[in-house]
Amino acid sequence: MYTQEMLESIKKVEATRAERLANVKAGIHPRRMTAEEKVQVKMENHPDYIASQFAELAIGPNKGEKVPLELAEVLQGNPRVNPKDIDLKKIDYDVDVLVIGGGGSGSAAAIMAHENGANVMIVTKLRHGDANTMMAEGGIQAADKPNDSPAQHYLDVMGGGHFKNVPELVKKLVNDAPICIKWLNDLGVMFDKEADGTMVTTHGGGTSRKRMHACKDYSGAEIMRVLRDEVQNRQIPVVDFTSAIEIIKDEQGRAAGAVLMNMETKEIRIARAKTVVIATGGAGRMHYQGFPTSNHYGATADGLVLAYRAGAPLLYAYTLQYHPTGAAYPSQIFGALVTEKVRSIGAQLVNKDGEPFMYSLETRDICASGVIRECKRGNGVDTFNGGQGVWLDSPMIDMIHGEGTIEKRIPAMLRMYLKYGIDMRKQPILIYPTLHYQNGGIKIGVNGMSEVENLFVAGEAVGGIHGENRLMGNSLLDIIVFGRNAGVNAAAAAKEVKLGKKLNLDHVKSFMKEMKDAGIKTDVVSPKLLPRYTHGNPVYDEPNAKLMK
Amino acid sequence: MEKMVNIYLYGKKYEVPASLTIMNAMEYAGYQLVRGVGCRCGFCGACATIYRIKGQNELKTCLACQTKVEDNMYIATLPFFPLVKQPYDIEKVKPTEQIMMQLYPEIYACVGCNACTKACTQDLKVMQYIAYAQRGEYEKCAEESFDCVMCGVCSSRCPAGITHPQVGLLARRLTGKYLAPETQHLLERVAEIEGGNCEAALQDIMAKTAEELKELYNNRDFEQ
């Protein structure tokens, strides 16, 4: 239910709607920004450019580089266990390939490792499938239509990432995209299709061709539940409610397993493996710069911490994606994702006076910067707790494509808002950027391996594929392409490995020494594993609160 | 001052702000959740919850992340429910009635009580999609069950012991793989890629200098 002020503003949005609709139908959109304008709006408004929010790393492979303050804290945090307290001779799990993380990339990796004959096991912090994959709404890109090509897709990805992307990884991404859509289709993923089998595809921000494939607005959920089902059909063991808290190495310094911790009982277990795949996902729950997030509860950058301590360099860890359209109101869904598809199928960004202040499908970083600027200019709508937002004029969708389009194409969005008395078919919705994606991550080669031998990485934990900004629909794609790739290559590498005789945590010991030498004293223990929320309960401001752990 | 309400978490009383969801209210009360929490956005089904308002007979079900607290709400979470999952080989099964009979025969024991539909946290017509599954109408079952988050609340209320979410999932995979029309343009593009026909254009664009690439990018043509 909207406030009186909001309802007044909605009247202004409605007043300009007819003219905006007529323009859209005539193919006239608000002007796209020039390359120079994009640079300016980003430098002046994007959170990645607020220097005070970044710290220089004092130790580790990326020493001297800047990362978000909250990430620096966990990268340079204390290990959860002291290596001297861990008995690595007592092996609880002994496998060829250990996959850390039970989301989309981890599941894809496990399936392909299994397909290639490896004895593979998944270990996951919460339930199998509890991951950002499950929440990806909009779709998955692939250049599979006659007017499109992998090369055209390549161009869009590189430009979207501001040409910082690692070219070989982008090539792999776009080249394997149609192959991965076919793989998913053959596993039984229900893509939106026309009666003749043609894929229903749309634009995403920054795409030059309509290549966004979708499964209504449950794209990620549909993919995740099929992959999970496939893992179960293959009877691949999944150790759930268990997190990896350190990588284990062999005497040659190659990854050879992980120290595991039961999330409920805190019991420590040791997994030995010939190769390891980190598929731990993103970092939204780090709440960089105090932003709300669209991410899963477990998105706390754990894989980056494990890999960094093991000596694997990160790439572009300074760049995050703030999704332009997080829910700004009501408070119960603050920060929740409003899929880009809402804009793809016609909803415009408009300010409190009903003015379309920018082209609605610029790349995400530009769009988010534009929304932040519009609010700074005083053209936003007040929400709650001093927050602001702008309108996403959702009723336009049914007016453009016919009644029932919202219900058919974005049912999850409709349901989310209806629960709070807002019918997005009739009223616009309020949005503001939300922390959405970790553009950077662990550096890998085209084979999916980090700079630590036999330590593979897949999914959001990887850095470099998307440069400094990921396009919509390239994350679901990336987890499948690089998840499969990591699974295949980890299985192949496992065949070459002779089991290490001496498992060790020497790298953790030397990391602790490095910390000491650099004078780092901190209470922070990492990986973080889970966030802590208290929702403003005043009890937590009282002195006794420190006893409440 | 914020409006407060009393809720009962597993029977214990807590005073919490009325604006919070059940999940946030539990955290306000001091819980750091490990179970019964996931995406916090209504997609993952981790936070199935059963509640009753004091003085009312009706047991209600919901997702804790998607539901506001109410005064005098008695709350029990259902973080896990033992659903039955039958393994099968997607390459070998066929979309015929036999497969449901073989894997999930209990669906034919449905007594038509409709408790599953009443309990669904996504407002799906659960009993209807089970009926479609019974008749081998998998496309209809797939469509009707599509928004299922597999929270398991339906199964918890079922006197026949049916695992509805797995039935829907099987129907959807059969539909996606066998019943949905084939995508000719996808098959053609995959053949082109595997035949190496897309390689030259990719090599060509990868060989561009940064300036050339920017020029190309800034002057792209857009599909309308």
Image: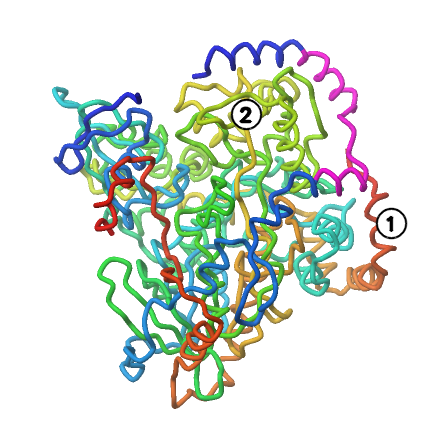
Task: Check disc 1 and report the residue beneath it.
Answer: B215
Between the residue at mark 2 and the residue at mark 1, the CA separation in whole angstroms equals 37 Å
Q: In the depicted view, which residue is nearer to us: A306 or A127? A: A306
Crowding around mark 2 (Cα neighbors within 10 Å: few <14, some 14 to 19, many 20+) is: many
Task: Give the amino acid at mark 2.
Answer: Ile
**Amino acid found under the numbered disc labelled 1:** Glu
Task: Examine the structure image and report whether residue A461 is included in the region drawn in magenta.
Answer: no
Query: Where, by quadrant of the figure, is residue A83 drawn?
Result: bottom left
Quarter of the image where the N terminus of chain A is located:
top left
Magenta range is A16-41
Q: Which mark is residue B151?
A: none
What kind of element bears circle 1?
helix
Q: Chain of mark 2?
A: A
Q: Which residue, given by chain and number where applicable, does mark 2 sit on?
A: A406
Left or right of A23 in this view: A326: left
Q: Residue at x 62, y 44 (%)?
A: A472
Q: Residue B108, position in %: x, y?
A: 26, 39
What x and y, as percent, mark residue B205? 82, 59
Q: Position of residue B16 (x, y in %)?
A: 25, 29
Count numbered badges in the picture: 2
Pinpoint the chain carrying mark 1.
B
Quadrant hosting residue A385: top left
Question: Secondary structure under badge 2?
Answer: helix
A217 in relation to B70, above or below = below
Q: Is residue A22 magenta?
A: yes
Q: Main secondary structure of the magenta part?
A: helix
In this view of the protein, can residue A11 be seen by the observer? yes
Q: Is residue A90 left or right of residue A512?
A: left
